[in-house]
Image (cartoon, rainbow, N blue to C red):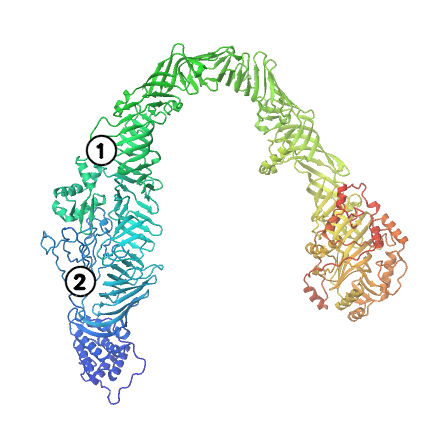
Amino acid sequence: MAWGSAATGRAQTAKPQTPPATTPPPTAPAARPGSGPFSTDPEKFIGEVVAVMNSTKNPGAIAQAEQLRQLWASNKLTSSQQAKVIELARKMQERRLKPRPHLEAFWGLLLAAKQGQQPLTDGQTDQLLDVTGKALAPQDLKDLEKFITSTTQFLKSRQLYSSRYNRLRLANSSAINFAYNETDYPGGIPATGGSGWDAAKPEPKPEPAKPAAPAPKPAAKPAAKPAAKPKPAPAKKKSSGWDDWDTGSWDTGGWGSSGDDGWGAPVKKKATTPAKKTTAAKPAAKPAEKAPEPAKPAADEWKDEPAQASATPAYMDSYMAPSTRGPVIELKDADLVLATSYDSVVIKKTSGTFVTSTGKFAGDGGTFDWQLNGNPLSAALGKFDFDVNKPEFKAEPVTLTYAAVLEAPVKGALAYKSVQRKGGGDTGYPRFVSLTNDARVKNIGDNISYQGGFSLNGSKMYSATLDGSLSRITVSYEGKPRFRAASRSYQLGDTLISANRAAITIFEDKSDSVTHPGARLKFSKPRQVLLLAREDGLYKTTPYYDSYHQMELSAEQLTWNLKTPDIHFQTLTAKNQVTAGFESKEFFTNTRFQQVHSINRMHPLQMVVGYSQSHNNAKRFTVQELAEATQLKEPNVRSAVAGLAREGYVSINPTTGEVTLLPKALHYVSSARGKKDYDHLAIRSLAANGENASLNLNSNTLLVRGVDRFNFSDDSVTVFVKPDSSIVRIKKNRNIDFNGTVVASAFIFKGKEFKFDYDGFFIDMFKIDSIIVKGKGSKGSALKARKENDFALTNKGNKATGRLYINAPNNKSGRKKLGAYPAFDATTGAYVFFNKPEVLGGAYDTTIYFDIPPFKLDSLNNANRSAVGFKGTFVSGGILPNFKTKLTMQDDGSLGFVYAVPKEGFPVYGGKGRLFNQVKMSNRGIQGDGQMTYLAATLNSDQFIFYKDSVVTVGKTASIKEGTLNGAEYPKVTLLPGYQMKWAVKQDSMYLSTAKGSDAMKFYDGTYAYKGTAVLTPKGLGGMGRMEDAQSIIRSNSFTFLPTQYKGDKGTVSVKSAEAGKPAVTAPDVAFTYDIKRGYADFARAEGVTKSVIELPYSQYRTSLSGGRWDFKKKTVQLRVAPGQDSTRAYFYSLKPEQKGLKFRAATGKYDLNKYRLVADGVPYIASADAWIEPDSGRVYVLPNAEMRAFQNAGITMDTLAKFHHLYKGEIKVLSRAAFTGNALYNYKTPTDSFAIKFANFTVDSAAVGLVKGEGKKKAALIKKKDGDDDTPPSPPTLAVADIKAADKFRIAPRIQYRGGVTMSSQAKGFAFDGQARLEFVKTPTAADWFPVQDSIDARFVKIRMKEMKAEDGTPMVTGLYQNEATGRPYPLFVATKGSITDGNLFEVDGTLTYDPKKRIYAISRHDPLDQEIYEGSVLTVNDSTGVMSFRGKVNFIGSNKDYTLVSSGVGRANADSSRYTIDAMMAFDLNFPDKAFEAMAEDMAKYAKGLPEALTTSQNELYKMGEFAGSKAVNEYANRKSGGGSLQKVSSKFLHDIMISQATMKWSNKYNSWYSVGKIGLASIGKKDINAMVDGYIEIKKESTGDAVELLLEADPETWYYFKFAENKLLAKAQHGTFDEILGRAAKGDYNTATDYGFFLGDESEKVLFVNHFRKDYLGDTKPQKVTARPQPTGNFDNMEDTKKDKKKKKGDAADDQFGSSDPAGGDTPTAEPEPSKKEKKKKKEAAADPNDPFATGGDAAPAAEPVKESKKDKKKKEEEAAPTEAPAEPAAEPVKESKKDKKKKEEEAAPPAEDKPAEPAKEPKKEKEKKPSKKKNEDDPFGDE
């Protein structure tokens, strides 16, 4: 036996208490523990227990035994209780219970009882032990096990049940007892008695006597399943009596759960005790012991049928309490807490019994409280029970108090279940349902009255009841009841009332209504909107019944806004397929009657009606009675009756099972038996928008939409209606108003205001538009299969009325065949109009008709159609005179006539013509048979067809008589059989045509054949067609025929040739005159035609010349421009594909029809390829096959768009539009000469063909705009080749000789040169050599690439200024090899050579020398007029080394032929020299240079020089500052040098082979110290046998000077400054005279004086030695000579003789300084750039800065300074010193250019150009001259 887990309690961790000393510890028996019964001695007993539990070796059991020993010794157990424990333990031993788990569980119970949360009293302990003993007595100890386990848990935790999911806890109780019940219900819960609440059963309402419901049988299982059906739907769960109030299901709890089978018969819950037998109201057919089984539902539809007032309540008669036998725990006034992880609730103040063996709690009384929306609810409980292991309970009866909603407490049932909330939604609990429909609900609505039940499902409120009784609401509006509904269960929301099934009544007037037995209902209280939809059960397809209209209405949904009078019937699904139905209540079809029979053995309708008739026409009876009478099984009868209820034949009381027979059932049975008349009135509505019908309650009109048609008879074609707009209006008792069409057999009535009277069964037609009689042969639908022989009788003046009798009023069904129906009585006459499509295709209007007087028609059927005839008058609307005849059926089945015309004929169309013989009328229209005359024409035909405004025929013969009629001339014409005629009466024109394949008309003498249409009018004869004779074919749409000639406009004239099918000339779109008498034809382009052409097929040409004359005798066609036409748009076009669209413009042309030769005159040019070939005579000969004769002495223009090249004396043959061949001369011009180049081999540049195709549209547009060739295709370039020899002395430009090939491209300004060139910039032959040229060069602006040139042996060919290694003498090279590889590179340049012919300036550079943003990079220019060279860039005066470095840049000029060179240089000296000495020098010079003019002026030359050091970007930023000058080191760290000179004018001395300075020196900085001053001084650089020698003297004033001499790789320095000399003296090592390696030494003042005297004497021509004088104020004149006027004049004169200065003792160099004025703003820079001959006026290119000088190892400080500096921000330059007028005048005189430097032919600039350049250089060729 396993008890499961025994609750023994937690082992104590504290040390066990020591037993009292007086009590000796028990001694263990000698025997094995547990081998014998426990001792009865308490002391021994506890020792034995401990020993037994220790023997289990289980730590928990051992610890528990110790706790028991302590309890045993604590005196908490009385002696009697100890004795009872011993007794129980010994009994357990006798029952052979084991120490674990049985004894262990028992010890745990004792410990929990005395040591739990609330230890038991002695009395409770005695009860506990007594119950334990009784539970131990039975053989099965399961009850003992459950009692010990449950009680132990309860005593320890106060929990009746606990799990990880839920628990039941005792929160409070006034009393706890333990008992053992030998039987059920001992004490407190009686075994017998009522349900525990009085008056719970409602008194049944008095009803007519009827059979009692069968006695309920105790149900051992749920109600039986529905009767079997084919493919049954899944069975739904049975209703529990809560009906539809929630979606969950209730199990069968402690109260009855009725199964609803659709009939409402409740099925009671099986009780534990036998149910009392009930006695039926009348004797049962069978013994009472075999009560009838509960009725099974006939189908699923019956399950949710709303119940009427129950005869028997659906709840238990008495509460059946669960069994309470065995051990129990009794509680009194307890608060029970049911808790889960979701929520917890409390049952307060309840008393009951916890049966541990079953786990049930049986309670009595108490309250259950909760809240909804902040409002309290309280349920007073009766007797109830529940499983303690489930967080749920049910209680019945309860009394619910809900003050916020209910006016008074309501009795009912309560259920609670802890359910997890999903998504924050409602759990559906607690639930309450009232006993019956006696609840009074507050605030349900101002206009809503409610009588019914009350139920809750969580927070949702419903109207369900336990007894299944109905709840009713009545809704009023504006004081009048609008509708009433009854349902088992409403959901009563704050804003919405809804029900899954409700019986509905909508009030129409005092006596009529719209009803439905069961629909899904929703009513919006705020909006006052009612919505009814089909429910899912029994009444899913049941129609509404409308008593006012006596019709059944079938629709998926009804909506009604009570604020409006309109009720809408709608379709929701498949609106284009699902119809809404509107049937008369007298509607019957045998098909439907048989469908009701279905597979039933007995017809259900026959069964119920037969029962009624056999039982005194009883209208009410039960299913049981019906089953007994028919001897059928009751379930089968129920199923059959359910089907009848679904279709509205019967109604059912679902509670009592009572069946009520409805009139529809009697109507169907009587109609089927032929005992009653019926109708076929059924209207189907198919509305695309789903709005099928609207019922207006004010007028009670039912407006039905989407009605295609509806019938009055059963054959569907005899009488039916097709309403206009698919709308009908149904009135009282099925009267119907409509507009549209009524079909009655062979007659069709169309009109408006048709009214159908149901009782009289006729249609009053108040406005008949037409009556259509179907003709003979018409079949099928009267509307869809209309034939052309149908015709209409139309009312007169819109007043025609009539009445259509459909059938006799007592024969609506048509079951009696009455021949007089349908019948029509027309009270007015009618018209037969012939304006229908079937009559001559609808050609006639209402002016053509037949007038008929009043008439009557009986039996409108197909049999009498042939006898129809109407006498009257035919009115033709002016075609013919009116005449009387009879309208009869013609052979084609239509109404018409045949009438003989009087002999004198009928005038037609008011006398314009005349008809003879006969007139006919049928569907073929009005026709004439005979002869008709019009103007000069006579026509014969057997079928003249007359239209309202025309006559047509296919005639036999016709003729036009030659002559004059009413002033109009007509030629002779004969028409043969088969001609076609149409006479347009209003236009007064008759069209005579030849049909395809028929004979032509014969004109004139019969040799001119005409095919087409001739138009005969009162003005003459014209035509549209084709005239052919022996020598021509002429087509035109506007012929004019005269007696001896014909002419036309917009025609095509074709002159025939000897070859058939190939004309000699074709001239389309021309106006022509063909003169038969004079022998010629003139033609000219028709007016309004702009692009017509004349074609010459044999020459394969066409021309846009606009006219000409064809001479029949001379066989020539003279082509010319017609008067008023544009001669510049006249062209000849080649049609030969090989000539690719060749064309040319011409003024005239003459075409020889014998030789097929074309001579075109007035030809300005022929476009071939992209060139113009220009004939010298303006004449072009074109022979047959498009061959063009070759030209002599032709001109060529290439290309036609830009006209880059013009050639002359061309011998050219044009091959096609894309090619020509031959040769021609080109005059190549330079500014000083011209050359004739003979070009040949004219070809297309194939490499450009694809490119041109991509540019075709753009190119064509350009050509069209330029020269008028609107269809000239884009062409690739044309190339021509020439070969030039050196002996030709050809020059690309004045100083550039060339030899080799030249290629001309028509679309390029220049030429492609592939040969060799030589630059003749200087007279020295060795200065230039032949170099390869492969460039496209334009003579107007030459550009030749000169980068990385090499001689044939691979030696580099260079350009620039170079210095002889031995003498240092400069010499120029222009793409030539150096004289010696060791020669120095003074200045080098490469890149692109350009020549500007306007300025006559050559330039060589890697960049655009005119770009104002580029300041670095070498640039060399040569003035073509003077030969003077100008250059800028990096300059290498010496070969620097690690100890002495000189980095320079400069702007210079040179005359290489006279060896004169001048350079404005920027010099950076870096010396291996003591830094302290430089610092002393810097401080001294800065001190005494204050007040001197600034060295930095931001002049253009200065910016170019700076660019070689710092780059263009830094210089641009410096130049764009608002103020100039300042510190170079702030511009860039690359200006940090030992000595930085910003300006030094260096000239070359041929005599001394040296460079020497002229004028003042701009000292920018010394080391890091900014000086920025123009100081006095000298610089000399020359080559010596020992190497480079440089001497430098800087003087701030006569007493502040510094002298440096570098020679023989030694540096000598001296200063007029003690500190400088002292530092240098200490640092110098060795002897200057004996040193062999580099070193710096302190010099002597005599060396400085010696240098000064030498410089003045040799370079300045001043032989006066230097004198030491006091410090004078600086004057800016370094030589301290007297500034006399005489000297000024001399200098000015010298400058005028030579721009490099007059000869001096050193070799002709002048000492004149050339300072440049400051340029602060960018605007002045642009003005300087405006000088056309100044190549340096706008900027220079950037070159890499000089590499930093490698410093001496001794000078560590200098290294750190060079490593650290970064580019400092530039400071604004200081304003330049203002010059006096005297000084300014002197500078202008010094800057004046020499006369010989001016160009031989200086270009004269326009006046406007001069105005733009206010600041100009006085010499345009002087690169150093400033503004």
Relative placement, left or right, of 694 versus 1493 is left
Answer above or below: position of 690 versus 1053. below
Where residue 714 appears, as percent x and y from the top left, is 24, 33
Q: Nearer the viewer, residue 1598 or 950?
A: 950
Task: State the image coordinates of residue 1107 (x, y, percent, origin top left).
Answer: 60, 21
Q: Earlier in the sequence, mark 2 or mark 1?
A: 2
- For badge 1, the amino acid type reads Ser
Label 2 sits on residue: 318
> Label 1's element?
loop
Quarter containing the N terminus: bottom left
Can you identify the residue that label 1 sits on?
813
Q: Is residue 537 left or right of residue 1696?
A: left
Side of 1822 where 83 appears, left or right? left
Residue 1286 image offset from top left, x and y in percent: 74, 38
Residue nearer the viewer, 504 or 1137 = 504
Judged left or right of residue 130, residue 1057 is: right
Task: Say which quarter of the image contains residue 258.
Answer: bottom left
